[in-house]
Image: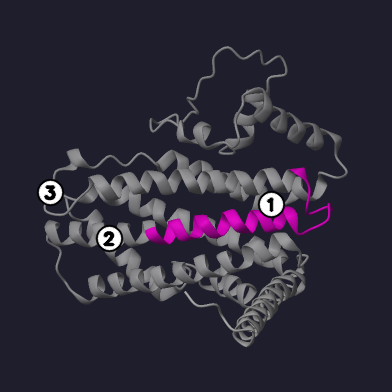
Amino acid sequence: MGKKKSGEEKVYTTGNKKWLVILGVLVFLVIAVVIILMVIPANTSGMIETLQTTADTSFLKNQDERDKYEDFQNKIKNNSIVKYYSEEMSDIIIISDTLSDVMVYYNDFIAFADQNNVMKDNYKGIDESLKNAQENQKNLNNILTEIARLTETAASYLQNAMIDLRTEYYNWLNNYQQALERLSKCYEGCFKESVTSNLASTTILNTINDYVDVIKDEFKVIVSSDVKSNLSSSNYNYKSHNTVLYFESFVDNYISNKSEIRNYTFDKTIQEKYEKISKFFELYEENNFYEVLASISSSSDGVISKVYSGVNDKEGLYNTVKDFLDCRG
């Protein structure tokens, strides 16, 4: 091969240098954009607005929506073949009303949260999950409107409608659960310790996540097992009723009534209670209350049936936890 002329080598070298300069500039711009994104405060206004809307218009909060749901509920109750859905339908009202109370609680505080990295990591996910839940709610309303429009009360029709409603409700519940997980992280990580942000509030809000997670998963099982074209109640095993009652009482006791959160800073007895609950996680090697709540019996007594073996619980930590979770009175 012939040797390149010196002029050609110069052009080749200069071309390489130009590409290196361009590449260096691009790398610099990418780094600059990343740095800017890291230091720009999170624009949470959209998420806060979505949370406000959710708190104000959660499922079954609107009277027209509630009336349509209760009309469907009565059709189910009055049909001897599918009336076994009645308890589940009543519990859906309880779950929806209870979650509405939780969202109202978060809505009262989230606008005052620090715009830190915890907020940056979570506010978009909260906004997306709640908007998805709003879409689920529109679908639920469409189902209820269609049921109210027709006078059909045949068992097969009512079962199909119930299955459609439950499936969409599970999706709604799943999106709420995802939003709550992120909201609790923001509440814990975006407020300085105070009379409303402390070990009590962190424990209570995380426990609400566990309740919703268990209830959601139990609904998922029914979505899979109770299918259309099979009217036999043998395929239907609804066992969430006691868990739902626990959840309702828990939120009433700790969220609607905020006394333990507000008095934690000043009351040594309350402080000791939550310190014992924290010790439970370490002693029993648990990260949350999911397994404990999933063990709530479906029998009339509704007791927590989870049993641990080989644990030397001298302080009675598990009993404290069970008393904390069961507020039914």
Tell which tag, 2 or 1, sits nearer the viewer. 1
Tell which tag, 3 or 1, sits nearer the viewer. 3
Question: Residue 74: which numbered mark, if any?
Answer: 2
Comes first in the chain, label 2 or label 1: 2
Q: Which residue is drawn at 68% across and 66% down?
A: 120
**Does 198 appear above or below 239?**
below
Identify which residue, 23 or 278, lies in the foreground.
Answer: 23
Which percent across, then down, holds residue 232? 14, 43
Q: Which residue is drawn at 83% across and 52% down?
A: 195
Left or right: residue 179 versus residue 29 is: left
Q: Report crowding for label 2: few under 14, some 14 to 19, many 20 or more residues within 10 A (C-alpha).
A: some
Kind of residue sitting beneath label 1: Asn
Identify which residue, 230 or 66, lies in the foreground.
Answer: 230
Q: Is residue 1 magenta?
A: no
The residue indicated by pointer 3 is: 230
**Does 328 appear above or below 11?**
above
Q: Distance between the residues labelled 3 and 2?
A: 21 Å
Region in magenta: 171-199
Comes first in the chain, label 3 or label 1: 3
